[in-house]
Amino acid sequence: MVKVGQVLDTLKKDYPQLAGNIKPIFVSVDPARDSLKALKEYAKDFHPEYIFLTGSPEQVQQMAKKYRVYVSKADETEDGDYLVDHSIVIYFHDDTGDLADCFTQSMRPTDVTEKIVERMTFVPEM
């Protein structure tokens, strides 16, 4: 998520006309712990442009299935704590809501920025 913040800052500086059209959204895959209050607190550590979302367990499961997000909750420890393993993918949607690209955690912020600029400035041939 830090990478997304770096990309947003670069876009604001170098492509301000594009940056205004980008809204980064974080969707929790752990609705049992990630209440709106918890997400609000968590958001303080990240770029201020982020929108943090959660939902019911069923809604989160539907979202994970739709985007093929791997989610696996580990067994709880004696004190009730647990980890949630999940895939880490940044989905980039166009202005109609269609999926335009996916970015993995191994990509450099400069590469993600270039791809976003390319996708947002592409004009199809007639």
Image (cartoon, rainbow, N blue to C red):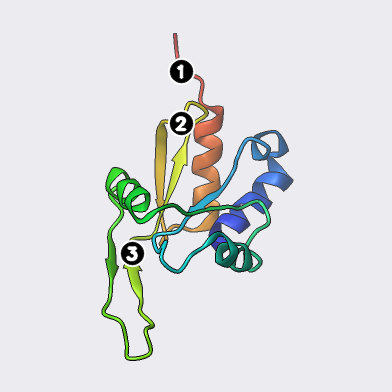
Can you identify the residue that label 1 sits on?
124
Considering the numbered disc 3 on the image, is that residue within a helix, a strand or a loop?
strand
Amino acid under disc 3: His
**In the rendered image, which quarter is residue 70 located in?**
bottom left
Amino acid under disc 1: Pro
Depth check: give the residue in front, 70 or 107. Answer: 70
Query: In the picture shown, does residue 84 fall above or below 76?
Result: above
Depth check: give the residue in front, 72 or 123. Answer: 72
Nearest to the eye among marks 2 and 1: give it. 2
Residue 78: x %, y % from top left: 32, 91
Query: In the picture shown, does residue 50 fall above or below 116?
Result: below
Rendered residue at 55%/47% (across/down) = 113
Residue 111: x %, y % from top left: 50, 51
Left or right of 106, for residue 77: left
Can you identify the residue that label 3 sits on?
86
Amino acid under disc 2: Gly
Q: CA distance from mark 3 to mark 1?
A: 35 Å
Q: Residues within 10 Å of mark 3 (few under 14, many from 20)?
A: few
